[in-house]
């Protein structure tokens, strides 16, 4: 199968579904990653957006090696990412490029504006996948992929399906540690000087594991619309 992780920022993929992608990779599936922004506002350590954006893209490319993933950067600006015609074409193209059987994206109920817009736009474009008259550069696809929303870590997010990632958790955190610029930036803040980038995902994934009687799990919710109902059996 082709698996597409289409999120908002470098590190979203690792935090939200890294364990699940590692599991898919182990089973021989092909992984694609799309990012709507390169997180080019995600540090005060650099003077230009281009500089930090390029650094974060390289960090994502390093992390992507853990899943042998192909990566596509859409390069919209974070915190300035809106639902526009240009954005919709770029997101639809990315969905078609991966020819996916399964898609993971941000939960549209997420309080982060970037996450919200990416998650909503991916959902809105599901019905546009097969249409040849839709404005897009990539060819229409005839598959009906299952779309899943990754855990947002917010209290209002309740998963409806879980993937056991007990065997993948250490590698998931290793992949997450490729995002060095984020670790460095966080550690500049006095209260975060011992910032451990793996701590939050490890805690959340342990809690999700507790809910389904395993050590570590990632939680997901399915997107439902006629013709594109989520097939939970496609999860690893
Ligand atoms: Zn994010």
Image (tube, grey):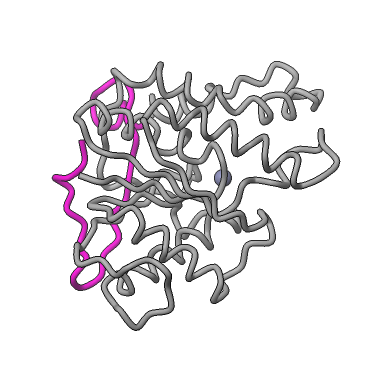
Q: Of residues 127 and 49, which is closer to you in this image?
A: 49
Quadrant in which residue 132 is drawn:
bottom left
Drawn side of residue 67 relative to residue 154, left or right: left
**What residue is rendered at 34% in x and 48% in y?**
4
- Quadrant in which residue 20 is drawn: top left
Count numbered badges in the picture: 0
Q: Quadrant of the N terminus?
A: top left
**Where is residue 197, by image quadrant?**
top right
Residue at the right extreme?
47
Q: Residue furthest left?
A: 233
One can see residue 192 in this view:
yes
Of residues 34 and 200, the one nearer the viewer is: 34
Q: Is residue 111 in view from this perspective?
A: no
Q: Residue at x 40, y 32 (%)?
A: 18
Task: Quadrant for the C terminus, please.
Answer: top left
Q: Quadrant of ligand 1?
A: top right
Camera-side residue of 109 and 80: 80
Q: Which residues are magenta?
A: 208-236
Give the answer, above or below, for where 196 lies relative to 20.
above
The answer to whether 24 is drawn above or below residue 127 in the figure is: above
Q: Tell me if residue 58 comes above or below residue 39 in the rendering.
A: above
Indicate left or right for 122 with 234 as reference.
right
Q: Position of residue 44 (x, y in %)?
A: 81, 38
In the rendered view, does 9 fall on the left or right side of 89?
Answer: right
Horizontal and vertical percent position of residue 227: 18, 70
Image coordinates of residue 3 in percent, x first then y, are 29, 45
Q: Tell me, yes or no, whether the highlighted magenta stretch contains residue 70.
A: no
Give coordinates of residue 92: x percent, y percent.
41, 66
The structure residue drawn at horizontal position 25% and vertical position 46%, both measured from the top left corner, is 2
The residue at 73%/47% (across/down) is 41
């Amino acid at each position: 199968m082709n698996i597409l992780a289409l999120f908002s920022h470098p590190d979203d993929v690792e935090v939200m579904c890294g364990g699940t992608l590692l599991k898919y990779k182990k089973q021989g599936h092909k992984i694609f990653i799309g990012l709507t922004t390169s997180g080019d506002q995600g540090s005060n350590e650099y003077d230009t957006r281009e500089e930090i954006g390029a650094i974060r893209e390289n960090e994502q490319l390093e992390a992507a090696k853990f899943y042998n993933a192909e990566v596509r950067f859409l390069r919209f600006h974070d915190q300035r990412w809106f639902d526009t015609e240009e954005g919709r074409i770029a997101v639809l193209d990315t969905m078609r490029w991966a020819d996916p059987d399964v898609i993971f994206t941000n939960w549209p109920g997420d309080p982060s504006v970037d996450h919200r817009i990416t998650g909503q736009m991916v959902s809105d474009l599901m019905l546009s996948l097969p249409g040849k008259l839709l404005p897009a550069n990539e060819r229409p696809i005839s598959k009906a992929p299952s779309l899943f929303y990754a855990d947002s870590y917010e209290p209002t997010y309740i998963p409806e399906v879980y993937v056991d990632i007990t065997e993948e958790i250490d590698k998931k955190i290793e992949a997450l540690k490729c995002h060095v610029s984020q670790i460095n930036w966080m550690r500049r803040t006095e209260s975060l000087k011992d910032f451990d980038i793996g701590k939050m995902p490890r805690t959340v994934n342990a809690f999700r594991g507790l809910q389904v009687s395993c050590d570590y799990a990632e939680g997901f919710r399915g997107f439902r619309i006629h013709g594109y109902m989520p097939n939970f059996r496609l999860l690893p």
